[in-house]
Image (tube, rainbow, N blue to C red):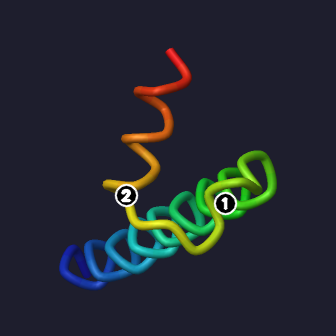
Amino acid sequence: MIIHHQKDFRIIYIAAVISALVSTWVLVFFLVPETKGLTLEEIEIRWAKAR
């Protein structure tokens, strides 16, 4: 019985993590349109120049 509940919790936890990652990605994608198609290094260089 305990093992079964741990399995259910693990599935819920994985689903929560995936949904958090997807929602974060969607927010970044729509809020920061000028970073489309750029690597992280290029984005960091642009942000450093903007400061």
The total of numbered circles placed on residues is 2
> Residue at left 38%, top 41%?
45
Q: For residue 6, what is the image quadrant?
A: bottom left
Q: Residue at x 60, y 62 (%)?
A: 25
For disc 2, the neighbor class at 10 Å (few under 14, some 14 to 19, many from 20) is few
Q: Residue furthest front?
A: 49
* Rendered image: mark on residue 40: 2
Q: Quadrant of residue 24?
A: bottom right
Amino acid of disc 2: Leu
Identify the mark at residue 15; answer none if there is no mark.
Answer: none
Q: Between disc 2 and disc 1, whose residue precedes?
A: 1
Instruction: Name the one closer to the observer, 44 or 5.
Output: 44
Seen as rendered, the residue at the extreme left is 3
4 lies above or below 27:
below
Residue 30, position in %: x, y?
80, 57
Question: Tag 1, which secondary structure?
Answer: helix
| The furthest residue to the top | 51
Q: Secondary structure at mark 2?
A: helix
Q: x and y percent of residue 18 in the render?
A: 49, 72
Real-space Cα separation, disc 2 to disc 1, in angstroms:
19 Å
Disc 1 residue crowd, few under 14, some 14–19, many 20+, Cα 10 Å: few
Q: Nearer the viewer, residue 4 or 34?
A: 34
39 versus 24 height, above or below: below
**Which residue: 55% across, 58% down?**
20
Amino acid type of the residue tagged 1 in the rendering: Ser
Check the image and report above or below for 15 versus 24: below
Q: Position of residue 17 (x, y in %)?
A: 45, 63
Residue positioned 26% across, 81% down in the render: 1
The residue indicated by pointer 1 is 23
